[in-house]
Image (tube, grey):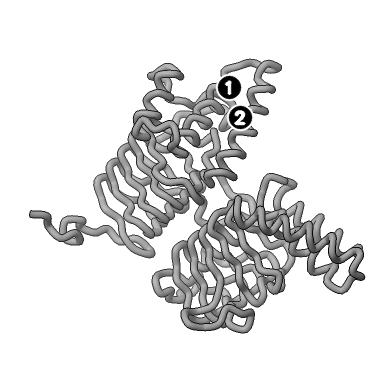
């Protein structure tokens, strides 16, 4: 439980204590639900009800959907809101996500975690990016806005275009 | 387009100075087809109000600020239009569609049209703290048309009367009257793209 509170405080800091950010609430609900998954029913069921309510509000009012199956890293930041669907097997630490982003299965694949993408640590996903299929976006990769990613993105590259092509990150843009 | 040295952003009324407040909002309403049910009009009206309130001195400003913040959140949550008051907004700017419109620009000129899910903002976040630099945001000159789901990112200038077509990503300056298309954008000749109408 202490680790949950520590992670939540970290999330608050990631969102600069702005409680009006829908992404913060979605993230918090997701963490609380995951932390109480094995708890006894008297604790688990009210928590489940509360997080379901937050998820419903986030989906209908803000357009952010983060399935319970997603393995969510720390300090993940969802910027703004609207048309965000994050069906990923895992989202790494320090990932940034933006409006109109869709993560999910490729066409024809069943909508289950095995056919969802994996987002590596420190990846930066631009607004409107669509990442489909059981692929992997590498650590510190940068997916450009409105790009369509259908294949693996190597570490430290920039993927841009429809469909996305991977380019090495420019030296000036190298991570510090 | 060199901006004159100004006090801190958002510390004073940034509305166009060549028109009174009510006339300005009436003009905004006309720009949105005179429809009071246009979400874009309300987003712009709240933006104008957020600026106007900076003329009022403290402590009288505090309740207006509270009202502005509540209205801003309602627009942001209800319509999905994120238009902070410290974005400099010209006259007759039209926001066509609600939903995931993020207007993080330094300045937007007169008669600009912004369509649904368009995003103006930073190109890359700065530093490890995830803070976005303000000088990293675009400037949109007058008469620009920004298509649905287009993204204009970084400290770029989109020249007057340029057209950013739908789904286009613009990470560079766009000259006046140009037409940008693609991810990333190329400049194209619109007349060749669109079949001639007889």
Q: Chain of mark 1?
A: B
Q: Based on the displayed image, in which of its 4 quarters is residue A47 positioned?
A: bottom right
Relative horizontal placement of residue A127, taking residue B72 as reference (left or right): left
Cβ atoms at labels 1 and 2 below 8 Å apart? yes
Front-most of residues B124 and A54: A54
For this view, does B30 lie left or right of residue A26?
left
Foreground: disc 1 or disc 2: 2
| Secondary structure under the numbered disc 1 in the rendered image | helix
Q: Residue at x 57, y 78 (%)?
A: A111
Q: Is residue A135 visible?
A: no
Badge 1 or badge 2: first in the primary sequence = 1
| Above or below for A159 versus A55 | below
Q: Which corner quadrant holds the C terminus of chain A?
A: bottom right
Q: Is residue A94 visible?
A: yes
Q: Is B142 on the left-hand or right-hand side of A42? A: left
Residue B53 bears which disc, if any? 1
To which residue does mark 2 refer? B68
Q: Label 2: few (<14), some or many (≥20) within 10 Å?
A: many
């Amino acid at each position: 439980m202490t680790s949950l509170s520590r992670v939540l405080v970290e999330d608050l800091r990631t969102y600069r204590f702005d409680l009006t950010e829908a992404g913060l609430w979605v993230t918090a609900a997701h963490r609380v639900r995951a932390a109480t998954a094995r708890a006894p029913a008297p604790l688990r069921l009210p928590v489940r009800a509360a997080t379901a309510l937050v998820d419903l509000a986030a989906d209908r009012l803000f357009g952010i959907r983060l399935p319970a199956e997603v393995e969510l890293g720390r300090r993940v930041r969802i910027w703004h809101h609207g048309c965000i669907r994050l069906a990923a097997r895992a989202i790494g630490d320090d990932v940034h996500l933006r409006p109109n982003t869709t993560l999910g299965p490729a066409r024809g694949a069943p909508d289950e975690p095995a056919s969802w993408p994996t987002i590596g640590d420190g990846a930066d996903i631009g607004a409107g990016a669509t990442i489909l299929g059981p692929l992997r976006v590498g650590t510190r990769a940068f997916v450009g806005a409105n790009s369509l990613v259908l294949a693996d993105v190597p570490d430290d590259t920039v993927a841009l275009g429809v469909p996305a092509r991977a380019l090495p990150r420019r030296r000036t843009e190298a991570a510090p | 387009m060199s901006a004159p040295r100004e006090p801190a952003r958002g510390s004073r009324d940034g509305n166009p100075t060549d028109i009174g407040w009510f006339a300005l909002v009436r003009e905004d309403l006309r720009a949105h087809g005179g429809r009071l049910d246009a979400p874009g009009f309300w987003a712009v009206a709240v933006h104008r109000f957020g600026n106007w309130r900076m003329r009022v001195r403290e402590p009288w400003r505090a309740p207006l600020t509270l009202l502005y913040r509540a209205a801003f959140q309602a627009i942001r949550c209800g319509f999905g239009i994120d238009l902070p008051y410290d974005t400099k907004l010209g006259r007759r700017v039209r926001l066509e569609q609600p939903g995931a419109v993020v207007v993080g620009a330094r300045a937007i000129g007169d008669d600009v049209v912004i369509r649904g899910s368009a995003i103006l903002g930073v190109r890359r976040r700065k530093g490890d703290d995830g803070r976005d630099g303000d000088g990293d945001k675009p400037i949109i000159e007058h008469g620009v048309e920004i298509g649905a789901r287009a993204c204009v990112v970084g400290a770029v200038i989109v020249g007057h009367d340029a057209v950013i077509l739908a789904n286009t990503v613009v990470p560079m300056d766009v000259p006046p009257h140009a037409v940008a298309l693609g991810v990333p954008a190329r400049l194209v000749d619109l007349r060749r793209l669109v079949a001639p109408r007889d």
